[in-house]
Image (cartoon, rainbow, N blue to C red):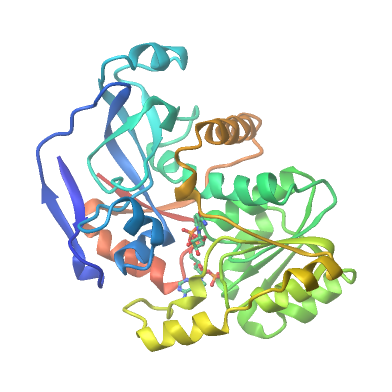
Amino acid sequence: MQRITILRPGGREQLQLETIADLQPGPGEVRVAVAAIGVNFADIAIRLGLYESAKKFVGWPITPGFETAGVIDAIGDGAQGDLAAQGLGVGSQVIAVSRFFGYASQVVVPVAHLVPLPLGWTLAQGAAFPVAWLTAWYGLHHLAQARAGDRVLVHSAAGGVGQALVQLAVAQGCRVLGTVGSQAKVATVQALGAERVVVRASGQLWPAVAQWAPDGVDIILDANGLETLAQGYKHLAAAGRLVVYGHASMLDRGGGKTPLWRLAWRWLRTPRWNPLDMTTTNKSVLAFNLSFLFDKTAVLREAMAFLLARVASGQAQPIPVTEFPLAQVADAHLALESGATIGKLVLRV
Ligand SMILES: NC(=O)c1ccc[n+]([C@@H]2O[C@H](COP(=O)([O-])OP(=O)(O)OC[C@H]3O[C@@H](n4cnc5c(N)ncnc54)[C@H](OP(=O)(O)O)[C@@H]3O)[C@@H](O)[C@H]2O)c1
């Protein structure tokens, strides 16, 4: 099998393609012959050595990758019954989540980390499904408890997680304002049903938010970090929830390594909130990281059931994908680091 290995933290030259012996599924596990792999912004943080759970669960060297799609080609002892209960067996097309190791032509996962590929979806669309949608579900539904009529602000709304968030919020009956980094992304977010789309760089963002929601915003989904957190909190309505799930603006756009002093400076300027003030102002800040949730099988199952029902009803449409061959993974990272991509990037095996 082939996989991408990063020997040590660094630039895109660290993404090395290597050939190793085939994997064998252990008890309760299944092997998937991978056809497509979802690329995530977190993979860049992993490569740069800035991703905590990569250090905690794997260390170096590491093969990144949280999501794949392909065909089941080997079944470990004791896994047959659970697979059959889902109508799956050797030859079934599936989507798999794994805590790392996804940038590979084979993955081995427990049955609980597999779902069938939705009818009519391509394997590339399937590989782009789990991380963006699980993240969106966890932030919007599990933590923020979105209800019909809520005013929801989604940052980076044309990206992978952003598009899933807009679709879920619209399906829930929320009113959505999306922000994007450039004019080229506006039409995509409008087409998903957002009421307003604002280009952040225009300097018009917060006046536009105040005009759109004069009493404040009920829910904000923010993976920018420093760039937008302080103003976001300020623009929350009473009982509003600011959900933080990333810090993309810590890194310089365009890729390469952000100098350590600049990272430290941005870290120092990241807002901190006082619980005493928060009780008085009646606003919450919530935060999470999906990779710490992989062992929570019940939550994963609940999330997947919810999301697959949305897919079946047509309320969750596949996010558009741009494909790169696995050997050109460095080009995919370069594209994602540019901040210019729309939808998801997928590696083709
Ligand atoms: N907590 C979790 O478990 C979890 C899970 C999945 C993803 N995430 C986070 O969610 C965010 C979106 O992830 P994604 O994989 O779906 O990526 P994405 O949104 O498809 O792409 C990243 C987008 O972030 C924006 N951005 C802001 N600052 C940037 C910078 N310095 N460099 C490059 N882009 C920058 C750009 O969009 P605009 O310029 O249009 O804003 C860019 O297109 C990331 O921050 C990621 O780390 C967190």
Taking the image as shown, residue 217 lies to the left or right of residue 109, namely right
Pick the residue in front: 215 or 52: 52
Q: Quadrant of the C terminus?
A: top left
In the displayed orientation, state which residue is furthest to the front: 276
User: In the picture shown, does residue 331 fall above or below 272?
Assistant: above
User: In the picture shown, does residue 85 fall above or below 299?
Assistant: above
Residue 64 seen by the camera: yes
Measuring from the top left, give residue 190's x and y in whole percent: 68, 60
Taking the image as shown, residue 34 lies to the left or right of residue 14, namely right
Residue at (39% x, 25% y) in the render: 111
Residue at (89% x, 72% y) in the render: 214
Measuring from the top left, give residue 104's x and y in whole percent: 24, 45
Measuring from the top left, give residue 11's x and y in whole percent: 25, 73
Q: Quadrant of the N terminus?
A: top left
How many tags in the picture? 0
Taking the image as shown, residue 154 lies to the left or right of residue 23, namely right
Residue at (43% x, 61% y) in the render: 41
Residue 197: image quadrant is: bottom right
Measuring from the top left, give residue 35's x and y in whole percent: 29, 38
Pick the residue in front: 87 or 112: 112
Residue 56: image quadrant is: bottom left
Taking the image as shown, residue 201 lies to the left or right of residue 291, namely right
User: In the picture shown, does residue 292 fall above or below 305?
Assistant: below
Residue at (17% x, 33% y) in the render: 23
Residue 129 seen by the camera: no
